[in-house]
Amino acid sequence: MKLNRKALVLAAALAAVGSFAFAQGSSESAGSKTTQAAGPVHVTLWYPATQTEVGPLPNDWAGYQIIKDKFNIELEAQTLPSGTQDQDVKIQAAAAADDLPDMFTAGREVWLRLASNGMLADVTDLYARMPNRTQLMFDEGAKKYTTLNGHNYGFATPAAVSRNEGLVIRKDWLDKLGLEVPKTTDDLLKVLHAFTYDDPDGNGKKDTYGYGAFVETNNYEAYPGRRLEPLMGAFGVEGTWNMTKANFGLQINKPEFYDFMVFMKQIIDDGVIDPNWMAYKKDDFRGAWKQGKFGCFREQNSALHSENNYAPFDANFPNGDIIVIDPVTGPSGKASVGPAVRNMRVWCISAKAAEQGKAEKIADLFEWMSYGEGYMLCGFGREGVEYTLDANGNPQSVPGDKGYNGPVGQTYIQLRNMAFNYTSDMELSSRYPSYTTKVSGKHMSSLETLHNMQGRKWTDAVGMESMPVPSTDLKTFYEQGLAEFFSGKRELTKDNWNAFVKQFNDMGGKAWEEEGRKYAEANGLLK
């Protein structure tokens, strides 16, 4: 039975403080709603910024007028928070208030809740309206990712280049302290201790830490999240799930997860991880490593070595050197940067927008962004202003701040994530050009960094991102429990850990695991 709007809003409100009540999504296609106002159609867009460390899309972005002229759309664009977790919190709060924007992006866990509660438009018939975008981005796997009860409730779009992160370390600190690149977890503990207590920056102060992180979780990287995955990988418990036929299940139920917890607690108790790691947001974390707060962390290639992102570190530490290293090997010989998935975010159209006849307009906008004029404007800016074309017709950033690689030009390509599919050579080479740093004069290339990171050891986990999600209560219990072990509020002993895991399974963890097994088997995800 379908829920009415009042019930849907109530269900969404409950989700903000507890868990969503589940119901069937609407099966009426968004394309069937055609009533529109005579004047320009007002469309609200919440988008994830391409570059979080520069400003939002400027009011004088040329696309606003072009979109109005071509599609009769009055676009109102608002940036989402920089972290995916904070993005999802904002979306859920809007859903609870029955105030979702017309189009927005969400992680699969939040998408599933919204779709199940009838708050998203059925877009099944809109793929045919976007032939170019569909051919480039929406294969059967992408469509399956956003299918619920035989209908499609969003467009699964690549959110980033795959395997674009890595474990990195301050090589200049290693050199100053006479240390080698750590190969094992024992090596890493020694290096982190030295980075914390042996004054690696030589300023005579105790103001550095070994490891840095922040909590960044998603459907396939459960708490403590992505920044700790290289440590979890040393014990074979990277990612939310073990996706092998021989050992399938939730990683928290594996004996090795306790071994990781002991290792992590050792790092915390030795004081060699930045103590703000549980409080940091993404921008805090990135500001901290650029200020030399810690010397080992997991980071993304562009955030690390793209010109505008690396410039503050280069100015602060002209002799600094951050290199990509192999993930450290644990006591059983295991190592991994983390799970490698398709990195999908879901572009959604709200059910209310479809009811107001906006869905087809939004589909036309998506299509325009996928090729030709819209693609170039969203991805590279304006020819002669943010980019020029080389002899082969490939865009090149105009030198200086106004080029699309500069701090001013980057604001004009904040919708790049809506245009790119992150696979073509042109996109990669233009997005990650080589350059010479202004202060130290070093040659840098975030594209070379990307290839370096992609060549490290990852765990193939395609499909893990589409696995069933836990209830909000179960997820909260899981995360709070681990946080209490880390903080010392709950003593980490084998008996205490086993009791916690049993309680987790009794309150729904085992049922979640069995649901995951059925889904993985039915969809051929086990390896």
Image: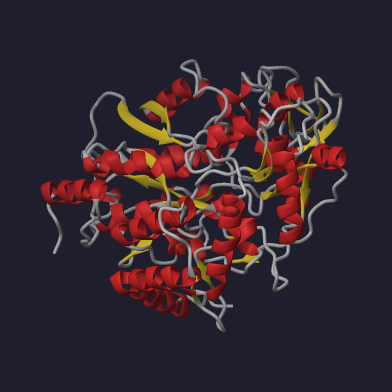
Q: Nearer the viewer, residue 147 or 256?
A: 256
The answer to whether residue 198 is left or right of residue 16 is right
Report the residue at 34% width, 31% height from top. 44
Rendered residue at 57%/72% (across/down): 256
| Way the structure is coloured | secondary structure
Residue 512 seen from this side: no
Q: Nearer the viewer, residue 185 or 158?
A: 185
Where is residue 192? Give x, y as percent: 71, 47
Instruction: Locate residue 424, reporting x and y percent.
Output: 69, 47
Q: Is residue 415 above or below residue 107?
A: above
Q: x%, y% of residue 365?
A: 44, 37
Query: In this picture, is 332 found above or below 27?
Result: below
Hey, which quadrant is residue 262 in on the image? bottom right
Q: Foreground: 271 or 14?
A: 271
Can residue 518 be seen in the rendering of this structure? yes
Horizontal and vertical percent for residue 510?
Answer: 36, 75
- Identified at 75% across, 21% down, the residue is 315
- Can you tell which quarter of the image residue 515 is in? bottom left
Report the residue that reaches farthest toward the bottom: 246
